[in-house]
Image (cartoon, rainbow, N blue to C red):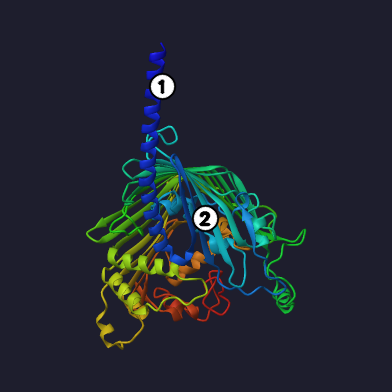
Amino acid sequence: MNKNLGRALAVVAALGVLYAGTSMWLGKRVEARYTTLLDRLESQLGADKVAERHYDRGVFGATSTVVLQFRVSDSVPEPGEAPSPSEGADAGAAPHADAASGAEAAASAPGDAASAAVGAATAQKLAQTGGHAGNTVRITLRDDIRHGPLAGWRPGAARIRTQVVSVEGIGDETRKLFAKARAPEFVTYVGFGGGYDGRMSLPAGEMADPQRPASRAQWQAAEYDYRVNADATHVSGALRWPQLDFHAEGPADQSADAAEEESADAAAPATQAPAPGQPTTAVEIALKGLSMRFDYREVAGQWLMAPGKADGQIDELTFAHRGEAQTALQPALAMKGLRFDAETVDNGGLLDTVVRAAGAGSLAGAEFKELRYESRVTRIDAQALATAQRMLMAFMKADAGKPAPDNEAQMQAMIERFLSAKPTYSDRYSATANDGQKGEFGYSLVVGDLPATAAALPPDIPWAVRAMQRLQVKADLRLPKSFGPAVAGMLNSPGVTAAELTQMADEFVRRGWLKQDGEVWTGSAEYAQGALQVNGQPFSLAQLLMGGGGPEAGAAEEDDSTVDGVAGPGPQSTPAR
């Protein structure tokens, strides 16, 4: 019996030595891979942005600490505002509460867990610092690494837990803004082949403007899953965000006299909380049940418009606003079961992308069977986009407050290549009512060939002028008259009613700017080579500025101030203008 016990102990000891040896060997491999990814991060951000990096490896685990620093551009305090002191912030009050920032960072610039945390921690650094006069913001990240071969009770080379330890250099106002927001945490599992997958967890929290406590954002806990292959060229994952609410308030518009008095008072702060009882404007957005999946692949290190797909759903989305002199929020948009998808395709070095969204909902309280949106971008030159990406990275490397690198020649060459591919951009919105009536609005921008008249332009003319010579713009509208109340409600402007919109549209029909087909208004416009056509007829800007009628108005454009009781082209035709 003692002999069997001795053998068992010997086996256990051998397995322990084998496990320890394997863990140590994997630890060396993980450190080498980790160091490579940090080197890549440093080359992307700039050596001066990575202030410190320490890696302490043991037999079964390691600890890595990375300190990033960013110089915030100088800002001039507003009248009556003192510069905010720069103080440290603990992890519990760290201003990094945007799950979308972490998702975008991991999806667009795949790297290790520290890289993903950097994305979450730095995507909003300029908005979150709250400092003045060239403050330096320091972000400390810590990775707790557990070596395999059983890392986190699953086979793998390592398990990495990434946390934001501290953020230094932010002001008191920023600290108050994010007092109830906690930083996201990343748990990443590194595979034996070098690829990794993990999850970012964003705790529930809220942000509140110290100057306007009613302005706040609140959210429930979100989860973002990611998977990256060994060479960081393929990233896929999913995002789940149960609820996000945003409410912002501002003072109502003031009279010219009041505005003059406020500007003359140099001691008054530029932004103040509204006094109790003072009218305020407001915007409110509520999102429930966001879920999405994505799968993208880098091509030659290019992550801008990387080819791939994404799709998802939002269970409920609402938008409401309150205008001046209104006491309650007015519904503008409400949708249920909103489905969306996006796809980018590489067609021989030219990138095409499409984004679609559709669902049932209401506009200003009017119910619609379907609301649909589609956006397309085609013929984007991949090499021109790669140049833009390099310029963007160079800009990100530069210190705030320093002049940007002189790359005018590079930019002009990039733009010329971009225009030569003849890219296009288009948006289309449609709404189908429960009775089958359909309204549509769409526009497109196309870059064509340079017209023959461009040969007479001076050779040193700015590229923007040449670009305008190649630009072709089209727009079209189909609006049933029954949609008038929904349009008026969306505008939410004092004095703009459905009846007044109808009167204005009828005036546009008289001028030839719109057409009427039964109970539907239609119209089209096209701009090309410096000429504008409306409904197929030449149109000059002077006609609009001077209050003149369109090409079909004919003899109706006289000095009469009214036609059938509707404001005419005379000096008092304000709606038409």
| Relative height, residue 289 to residue 388 (above, below) | above
Report whether 391 appears left or right of 563.
left
Residue 178 found in image quarter: bottom right
* Residue at the far top in the pictured view: 1
Q: Is any part of residue 500 visible from this angle?
A: no
Pair 1/2: label in front: 1
Q: Secondary structure at mark 1?
A: helix
Residue 403, horizontal then vertical, whole percent: 47, 77
Question: Residue 121: which disc?
Answer: 2
Which residue type carries mark 1?
A: Leu
Q: Among all residues in the image, which is located at the extreme left?
A: 348
- Front residue of 190/516: it is 190
Q: Position of residue 23 (x, y in %)?
A: 39, 38
Q: Position of residue 406 (x, y in %)?
A: 40, 79
Relative to 153, say whether 424 is above or below.
below
Q: Which residue is mark 1?
A: 9
| Residue 491 vertical placement versus 453 (above, below) | above
Viewer-proximal residue among 53 and 183: 53
Residue at coordinates 36% horizontally, 80% vertically from top-left? Answer: 465
Which of disc 2 and disc 1 is earlier in sequence? 1
